[in-house]
Amino acid sequence: MTGPLLYARSRALPLTLAALAGTAAFAVWAAGRLDAYLDPERRVPIVALAPLLASAVIGTSLYSASDELDRTAVRPWWPRRLAQVAGLAALAALLVTPAVLGHADTFGAPSVVRNTLGCTGITAAAAVLLGARLSWLPAFGYVTAVYLGSHGTRWGAASVWAWPMQPGTQPGAWAAAMTAFALGTALYAVRGARPERARG
């Protein structure tokens, strides 16, 4: 096996890709059940929760079973880590987008892309701080709190802190999500996931 294939296998990327496809299929199915064509506001659960599930799937692939070998490798790991997070985030956004086609100015594809990138950034940062197995937890807590506590909150400062619940055209929401993605991805690319010791 060549280097990239070994890297993909060590990070369980084939299983991650299958799980992302399953998440996207579930999002499309769920969106069809909401009758969102009657009212774009009905898409809010999909716009908030599908990217959250996709980022949790991505977080599981950030685990390294051989962090000692990673640290002693001759070649730097940051390009592979960067490509892994950025590639999976882009693929996840692309796969989940068909669930919310149309209504780009409200809760359409731009909202899903933004939320997928933002949640992935939070998950990548959490993998560095908490480890890959718990990397889903901060994004889950944040998005759930915003989902439950910011209904109808739009514009102004709310568009920054409540970015997962904002329409797709909000500049403040995009700035917050892209900042989270850039910082989280950069942190993971440089540091890698926190080593997790075997329980015994």
Image: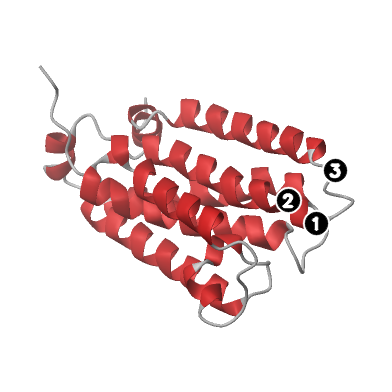
Give the residue displayed 54% in from the left and 66% down from the top. 163
Q: Are marks 2 and 3 in contact (CB under 8 Å)?
A: no
Picture coordinates of residue 138, whole percent (x, y) = 35, 50
Query: Crowding near pointer 3: few (<14 within 10 Å), some, many (20+)?
Result: few
- Residue closest to the eye, 99 or 46: 46
Residue under label 3, please give it. Answer: 35
Three-letter residue code for mark 3: Asp
Q: Does residue 115 lie above or below 136 as drawn?
A: below
Question: In terms of image quadrants, where is residue 200?
Answer: top left
Name which residue lies at 65% across and 47% down.
45
Tell me: residue 140, above or below residue 69.
Answer: below
Q: What is the quadrant of the N terminus in the image? A: top left
Q: Which mark is residue 40?
A: 1
Return the residue nearer the eye: 80 or 145: 145
Mark nearer the N terminus (2 vs 3): 3
Q: Which of the labelled discs sits on residue 43, or is there none?
A: 2
Q: Position of residue 127 (x, y in %)?
A: 29, 46
Q: Cβ–Cβ below 8 Å for labels 2 and 1?
A: yes
* Mark 2 burial class by Cα count in 10 Å: few <14, some 14-19, many 20+: many
Which residue extends farthest right? 38
